[in-house]
Amino acid sequence: MPDSKQWISENHRDQQMLSFPIKEKLFSQQSQFQKVEIFETTSHGRLLVNDGCFMLSERDEAIYHEMMAHVPLFVHPKPQRVLVIGGGDGGTAREVLRHSRVEQVVMVEIDRVVVEASREYLPQTASRLEDPRLKLVIDDGVKFAREASEKSFDVVLVDSTDPVGPAQPLFGPEFYGDISRLLNEGGIVVAQGESPFYELATQRSMLQVMGGHFPVVMPYNFCNLTYPGGLWSFMWASKGPHPLKDFEPQLVEKLELSLHYYNAEIHRGSFALPQFQRQALSDCIRGA
């Protein structure tokens, strides 16, 4: 029988097609930077799509946001000021704000349309955008990093889209030079790191760029439902803290029951790389 459902699909570089059945389109607007759409799916809740690429679904967005935020925040000894670059849906800021040790989060998002659409249509993800500890800045994250004061943040989270269009400079050496400058001693940066199945060359490039500015550099992985290949990576770089040797698992117990994916065992296990990824990237990893 023919399928009568409507589907929304992402074609990833003509290598994989990922599709979700949809009930209706809730939002669509062409911003200055990209086409922003939100769909109600039949199986994964609401789905945010930017320029045809899936950004998040309500069913699994917690995985990405928890793994981006909690891995560095349970390693840094005193994460008082956190900078989020990108992350306009609010999910990364939401997870950072679970930490009572965090005094201020500055979120710099280039596209106001993403923020406003998320506020209206993705309340689960954008639930902490009005938190008094959050300062929202609508601006170019590259420009913000370049102009930020020296040693003004403890942790930086680069919650970017793929390295195309306005996000492309977020993967370059000048940007990470600025990130190193604005981080305090012992500072940590974590960045969205693409797919090890499809984007190993990008992962190598990111590690090499980060390794030019930081003594500890390595990838860590997570699995989700929304991104091509299912297995996805973050890139860790720090001015000294090691994601396993300096991990404080006793702090995790205070949040564990309220989380969806992250726990102390997942934290440790996420740095165990598949053999193909380890072989491809081992010469770029520093401080392991």
Image: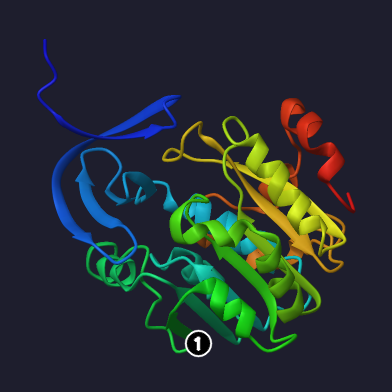
With 65 as the anchor, is 222 left or right in this view? right
Residue sitting at 87 percent across and 57 percent down?
245
* Quarter where residue 251 is shown: bottom right
What residue appears at the point 44 percent right and 64 percent down from the top-left corner? 91
Q: Position of residue 196 (x, y in %)?
A: 63, 35
Task: Name the residue that disc number 1 marks.
Answer: 133
Q: What element carries label 1?
A: loop
- Percent from the top left, x then y, of residue 229? 51, 31
The image shows residue 45 at horizontal and vertical percentages of 27, 47
Image height of 9 relative to 269, above or below: above
Observer-nearest of 277 and 206: 206
Of residue 28 and residue 2, the one placed in the foreground of this image is 28
Q: Position of residue 254 (x, y in %)?
A: 63, 68
- Nearer to the camera, 52 or 287: 52
**Image quadrant where one finds the N terminus:** top left
Q: Residue 204's quadrant in the figure?
A: top right
Q: In this view, does 143 lie above or below 163?
A: below
Which residue is nearer to you in this view: 50 or 225?
50
User: Quarter-wise, where is residue 249 in the image?
Assistant: bottom right
Judge whether residue 256 can be spotted in this image. no
Q: What residue type is labelled 1?
A: Arg
Q: Would you say 196 lies left or right of 115 here?
A: right
Residue placed at 67% from the left, 43% from the top? 203
